Image: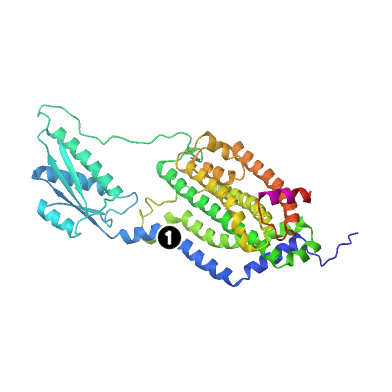
Amino acid sequence: MSTRDPLMPNAGIVARREYRDRVRGPLFLASTVVLMGLALLVALAPIGIRSVSRGTVTRIAVVSRDAALGQKAAVVADSLLNQAPGGADPVTWQKPFRIEVASDQAAQTALERGQVAGVMAVERLPSRQLDVVFRTNGVADAGRTQLVGFAAIAVGILDWTAGLPANSQLDPFQTPAFRVDSINTAADSGRPLDSQQAASRGFLGIVFVVLLFMTVVIYGMWVASGVAAEKSSRVMELMISAASPRQMLTGKVLGIGAAGLTQYLAIALPALLVLAFQDRIAEAILGPGSSEGAPIVGLTPALLAGYGVFFLLGFGLFALIYAAMGSFVSRPDDLQTLSLPLSLLAITGYVLAVAVLTGGAGAWVRFASFVPPFSPFVMLARIMVTAVQPWEVVLSVGILVVAIALVSVVATRMYAAGVLLYGQRPGVRAFVAAARRAG
């Protein structure tokens, strides 16, 4: 028969109290609504940009002292820059570029006045080599310059074939096929990702890693500041006499962490849904073919599940450490002293994950995907853009779960000693000494 006082708090009671106090705070709802609106605006930004730019036509002037060469360059540039996307209605689809042949003086004047986006000057040198200059008013747009460069190559090929002797027998020119063949790439339903899907996965991986990093740092500090605030007000001395340190620590992490995750989910889920269905939203708003080039394709339930697993485990690991850290400060202002090392750990994991997403992964990065506290960041990035064996994911999750269990034991001992430690400067030696005394 249990003799425990029913009024004594356990982990569940502490967690509910912390969650209620946080969620009922005056700034919680307001900040959640504002951040949710900002997240949705960011997620819908690509559609908005395409909606604004779809009705605009970019004008490019072509100039040449050789009228025939100028006309040929204009035709080639028009065929390359004005390719209708798949699914577009050829009747209603509007060309995004207008290629016009103009005199050099008129084109230069129009460029200076901003009436044209660029001037493509094509001349034939005495060696019969073509000299193509693309003049812009200010810094050149990278994508537009690349398209004009392709057009210059095509004009050069056609001009060369046109200059061959009349008795030369050549088949009509065919555009060469081009593809990128990469190894160790992620697959979807057993098929390697194409270039657009790979780029989309990389973009989505950056989003996921940034969200994980922000959650660990921001909401981890919530946990630490909650512990420090109760300790500074001496409320902790009353609570620690009514509940065990393990119950207090677990309740703090679950309660304050759940409040933070509630706000996080309210912000992230609508944005992720918009990103997942961005192609359909774009087609519904802008019409067929408007989803071409959408930044998010290939988002699967398995990826979302993997993100959820590593997100929860990573947050749990850091939240336990932040709670133990908060118990060692006498004032909430002292948290900055101890938060830097934890922030550096999170930053290191973030940097390693970015290395994976940008193609800079090596054996050492693969090793880091199994080492807590870096594994939530790095393994999440690996499953987004590279081929990862199922046993690797299981091993990474297993090691992370074991690490959380070990950290929980150590954090409980440090929490038990730290909550009653007043007037001492927090530091590594204080952590170690308190943990030994608690054991």
Residue 330 rendering spot, x and y as whole percentages = 68, 62
Residue beneath the point at 25% across and 48% down: 81
Q: Amino acid at mark 1?
A: Leu
Where does label 1 land, which residue? 44
Of helix, strand and loop, which one carries label 1? helix
The magenta stretch spans residue 294: no
Q: Quadrant of residue 23?
A: bottom right
Q: Residues within 10 Å of mark 1 (few under 14, many from 20)?
A: some
48 or 191: nearer the eye?
48
Which residue is pictured at 43% across the width and 45% down the height? 197
Taking 106 as reference, is 395 above or below it? above
Q: Could you tell me which residue is drawn at 69 percent across and 65 percent down?
A: 232
Give how far across and how far down residue 104 sits, in percent: 11, 51
Query: Outermost residue, right direction?
Result: 1
Q: Position of residue 405 (x, y in %)?
A: 71, 47
Residue at (54%, 46%) from the top-left corner?
A: 348
When the figure is inspected, residue 24 is found, relative to residue 46, above or below; the finding is below
Main SS of residues in magenta: helix
Q: Nearer the viewer, residue 191 or 311?
A: 311
Q: Quadrant of the N terminus?
A: bottom right
